[in-house]
Structures are given as structure tokens and as C-alpha cells.
């Protein structure tokens, strides 16, 4: 997923690359600060200190610029999840603690990138490119999560460990994604702090996978 979107004309010279990096960073900051409705090439140009003509020399439209920023951030997040899965698969933690810690670590990128992800998740409802890309990233995260959980397959009490690992991931992903999209009191007026929510999800998933607490 590291390739630039096909609509982007990558700069070749160092000066041009530095200029386009400023454009991508300015676009990201604008989206995080003000959301998609305020996202325009003119606003990005102003923030980046790069002419509108120079931006259009690299991308044909506002949506193409958004897709380029989206690809960049999702690549960063994907690398973070790969590192988490690799570290946790070899962990010597007891299995219940391993599951809880894996969920805590998997939740971190959601929280760290929540302002950008909130824009992306809402945009995915009307942008097929964003929705498809997001589904691919989520599926990769699911594979990584399952690889950690199924490394302790013999301790999972569910008769179908693969199914249980997948459902546990869906439970965690959907709860955290809804929190990012709509805030802490959308489903319930009780405002559960982020860390508490993640801790309870870890406990719930571990109990689902392993049975009651020892």
C-alpha cells in the first residue's frame, strides 16, 4: 500500500519533493483541524506556502490530493500495526495479559490518529476509494490481530478458534471506530474514558476467548 495513488505525479527533483511534502503535511493538518468541508486546494496552498499551480502540477483535483494524504497516513498506521503484531506474537506474557495488551496496543494508533481517522471514516460513506482502501487496511489489521491471538490457539476455549479470534477483532474494532467517529457519548450518555474503555474491551475479549477469569 506504499505506492502513491495513480493520479499523483510524483516530483523528481529534491526541491519539488520538499515542496510536495509541505503540501501533504499542510493538507493533513487542515483536515485534522477543520474537517473535509473546509478542505480546498486554495486553503492547502495558503498553509503550505506553495502555489495553487504547483499543487495542480502534482494532483488533478482536491479529491486526488485527499487520496494522496489518505494513502500516506494509512501507510504510517499500517507500519505501526505490523510492528505491534511482530512484537506481540513473540511475547512471553500469560495469554490473558497478552490479549489485553495486544488490544491496548492496537487501540493506540486509533487514538493517536483520531482526528484524521474521524475525517476518513465519515468520508468513506460517500467515497468508494476511501472505503475500499480503509477495508483493505482493516483486513490487514485483522490478520495481524488473529496471528497474535492464534499463537495461543491451544488456550482458546471456543470450538472454532479462528472464528473467535475474528469476532474478537470485530468487537474491538467496531467499538473503537465508533468512538473515533462519534465521540464518547453517542451510544450511551456514560462517558467512559478512552483508557478505561480499552481496558474493558481487553478484558471482555479475553473472557470471550478464554472463558471466565481464573
Image: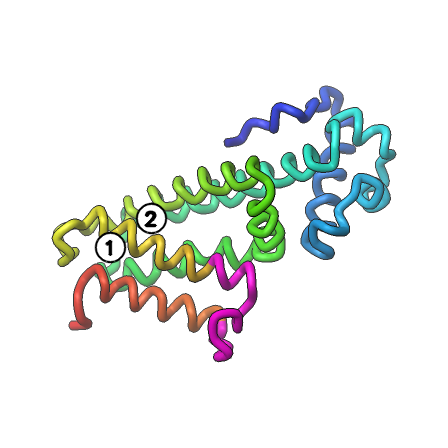
Instruction: From the viewer's perspective, tell me whether residue 160 is left or right of residue 99.
Output: left
**Residues shaded magenta:** 177-193
What residue occupies the far front of the structure in this picture?
A: 126
Residue 5 placement: quadrant: top right
Image coordinates for residue 10, horizontal then vertical, percent: 69, 23
Secondary structure of the residue carrying numbered label 1:
loop
In this view, the residue in front, 20 or 141, is 141
Is 151 rendered above or below residue 188? above
Residue drawn 86% across and 29% down? 53
State the image coordinates of residue 71 (x, y, percent, origin top left).
58, 37
- Mark 2, Cα crowd under 10 Å, few <14 / some 14-19 / many 20+, is many
Q: Main SS of the magenta segment?
A: loop
Of labels 1 and 2, the one closer to you: 2
Q: Which is nearer the N-term, disc 1 or disc 2?
A: 1
Residue at the image position 21 percent from the left and 59 percent from the top: 209
Left or right placement of residue 134 versus residue 16 in this view: left
* Residue 74: percent from left, percent from top: 54, 41
Left or right: 80 as drawn, with respect to 147: right
Q: Is residue 181 magenta?
A: yes
Question: Dot 1, how many residues are within 10 Å of its Cα: few (below 14), some (14-19), or many (20+)?
Answer: few
Q: Residue sitting at 75 percent across and 47 percent down?
A: 39
Residue carrying label 1:
92
Toward which corner of the image does residue 201 lie, by quadrant? bottom left
Q: Position of residue 131 (x, y in %)?
A: 52, 41
Q: From the viewer's perspective, is residue 12 above or below residue 84? A: above
Mark 1–mark 2 Cα distance, whole angstroms, equals 16 Å
Q: Which colour scheme is used?
A: rainbow
- Mark drawn on residue 145: 2
At mark 2, the secondary structure is helix
Q: Quadrant of the C terminus?
A: bottom left
Residue contact between numbered discs 1 and 2, judged by CB atoms under 8 Å = no
Amino acid at each position: 500500500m506504499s505506492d502513491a495513488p495513480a493520479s499523483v505525479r510524483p516530483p523528481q527533483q529534491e526541491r519539488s519533493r520538499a515542496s510536495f511534502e509541505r503540501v501533504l503535511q499542510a493538507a493533513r493538518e487542515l483536515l485534522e483541524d477543520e474537517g473535509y468541508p473546509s478542505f480546498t486546494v486554495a486553503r492547502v496552498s495558503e498553509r503550505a506556502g506553495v502555489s495553487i499551480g504547483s499543487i495542480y502540477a502534482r494532483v488533478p483535483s482536491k479529491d486526488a490530493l485527499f487520496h494522496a494524504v489518505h494513502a500516506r497516513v494509512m501507510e504510517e498506521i499500517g507500519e505501526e500495526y505490523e510492528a505491534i503484531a511482530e512484537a506481540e506474537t513473540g511475547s512471553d506474557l500469560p495469554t490473558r495479559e497478552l490479549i489485553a495488551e495486544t488490544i491496548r496496543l492496537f487501540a493506540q494508533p486509533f487514538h493517536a490518529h483520531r482526528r484524521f481517522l474521524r475525517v476518513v471514516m465519515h468520508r468513506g460513506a460517500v467515497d468508494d476509494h476511501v472505503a475500499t482502501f480503509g477495508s483493505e487496511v482493516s483486513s490487514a489489521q485483522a490478520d495481524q490481530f488473529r496471528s497474535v491471538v492464534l499463537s495461543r490457539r491451544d488456550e482458546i476455549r471456543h470450538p472454532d478458534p479462528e472464528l473467535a479470534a475474528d469476532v474478537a477483532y470485530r468487537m474491538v474494532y467496531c467499538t473503537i471506530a465508533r468512538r473515533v467517529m462519534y465521540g464518547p457519548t453517542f451510544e450511551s450518555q456514560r462517558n467512559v474514558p478512552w483508557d478505561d474503555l480499552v481496558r474493558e474491551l481487553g478484558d471482555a475479549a479475553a473472557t470471550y476467548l478464554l472463558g471466565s477469569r481464573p
